[in-house]
Amino acid sequence: MTSVIPETPKHKKAKALRPGARRPAKELCSECGLCDTYYIHYVKEACAFLNQQMSELEQAAHGRDRNLDNPDELYFGVHQQMMAAKKKDPIPGAQWTGIVSSIACEMLDRGLVEGVVCVQNTKEDRFQPMPVVARTKEEVLAARVNKPTLSPNLSVLEQVEKSGMKRLLVIGVGCQIQALRAVEKQLGLEKLYVLGTPCVDNVSRAGLQTFLETTSKSPDTVVHYEFMQDFRVHFKHEDGSVELVPFFGLNTKKLKDIFAPSCMSCFDYTNGLADLVVGYMGAPFGWQWIVVRNQIGQEMLDLVQDQLDTQPVMSQGNRKPAVQQSIPAYDQAVTLPMWAAKLMGVAIERIGPKGLEYARFSIDSHFTRNYLYVKRNHPEKLADHVPEFAKRIVSQYKLPE
Ligand code: FAD
Ligand code: SF4
Ligand code: SF4
């Protein structure tokens, strides 16, 4: 009688990199966590900064890649529907109204998944990310609110495989989800759900400190912040007060270098590979913006539909002149005096882009800035690293040499 010993998958023989060791993507590494696991075996194909393969992965995840001739898909990726929504009963302490945490809680509650990859913070530091595989609602809720720093969410993937878990929800940002999708088949799962958020301008923990100290009047009491549709940064402080700082008054000279090189080279702002994306920038102020990419995403949204108020997405204004004007500001690190910044902010808010047009404004401003960054700092990567959809978006503007 012969017994068949199942072959150990090759990746299990690979070794995670030790903390602090230089990652294969070098300075472009966004610390997604893949290299902290034996899945580093696949890094050359999987890393968003070594192998841009957006359209192939879109086909695998959604059954097709985005239609570049459809203006909404060009900007927001493959989708079945978009809407604005907010929780009737918001979760206290969530980044917005807590739609992301609510979906994850429902999925655990109903037994659709055995665990949720999400990111809590350490006891000592509210902004220091600590990825976990949450198995209870309490653990999911402890991960609510953004950790506005690079977070190695995928570092817990080895733990998932070792635990024998078969049904998993992963919450994450674009670069994490690209690497996840690339190794999805190797995880030994029966079912994977992916809940994404948009993401832009992320920073290391040290960079975050510089940002808070340069921009807020009380950096030590900031609980969370967001770059909002009214063209101001909203800092929420421990005592519940909100501090508003106009974008146009930010000290771009000092802030220019705080964003991580990965995030200055990133073109997956809207998290094109998640099943469902929950952000805010395509929705009216105070609402969240939902992009349902495929049927799995729709199933996830259905779980919380009765907890939400919803309304159709809208679009108003013309972003293009404001984007064209913002290009030299980023490029030459211009800072307006605060009074002028406030005036300009008010004027732009009155006549400026709203709803989906605001989302396009933000995408255009970041893609043009990032395109110039890659062109200047990694010219050899420009052709392959920038996805076709981003090249089309950038080509609408006149860029400095
Ligand atoms: P909550 O219920 O509070 O849950 C937040 C979830 O985010 C948690 O499950 C947590 O695990 C996860 N999370 C927190 N920090 C990280 C991290 N660093 N990496 C991966 N996962 C994390 N939306 C926009 O529309 N435009 C933007 O420009 C934009 N920028 C963002 C930048 C960053 C760094 C992040 C993390 C998110 C950004 N978002 C942006 C998304 C938005 O801020 C909210 O996270 C989203 O709307 C969900 O809100 P919520 O109240 O439903 O989330
Ligand atoms: Fe590894 Fe992720 Fe860094 Fe790429 S971004 S080098 S996959 S940790
Ligand atoms: Fe990753 Fe892009 Fe967000 Fe940076 S901006 S953390 S590279 S998704």
Image: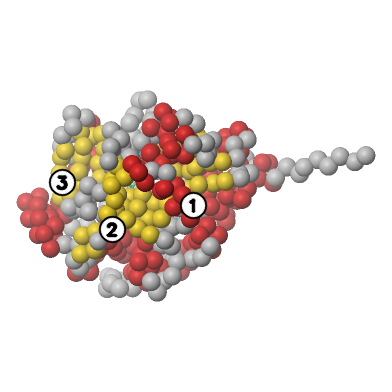
**Mark 1 Cβ inside 8 Å of ligand 1:** no
Furthest residue toward right:
1
Residue closest to the eye, 200 or 24: 200
Residue closest to the eye, 110 or 34: 110
Q: CA distance from mark 1 to mark 3?
A: 39 Å
Residue drawn at the location 34% of the way across and 29% of the way down? 125
What secondary structure is marked by label 1? helix
Examine the image and state in which quarter residue 139 appears: top left
Examine the image and state in which quarter residue 37 appears: top right
Amino acid under label 2? Pro
65 to the left or right of 401: right
Task: Give coordinates of residue 33: x percent, y percent.
Answer: 50, 42
Mark number displayed over residue 296: 1
Q: CA distance from mark 2 to mark 1?
A: 21 Å
Amino acid under label 1? Ile
Task: Give coordinates of residue 275: x percent, y percent.
Answer: 46, 53
Residue drawn at the location 21% of the way across and 60% of the way down? 354
Residue drawn at the location 61% of the way across and 44% of the way down? 189
Marked residue nearer the N-terminal end (1 or 3): 3
Task: Give coordinates of residue 240: x percent, y percent.
Answer: 18, 32
Task: Give coordinates of residue 286: x percent, y percent.
Answer: 22, 47
The residue identified by callout 3 is 245
The residue identified by callout 2 is 312
Amino acid under label 3? Val
Answer with the quadrant where ligand 1 appears in the image.
Answer: top left
Q: CA distance from mark 3 to mark 2?
A: 29 Å
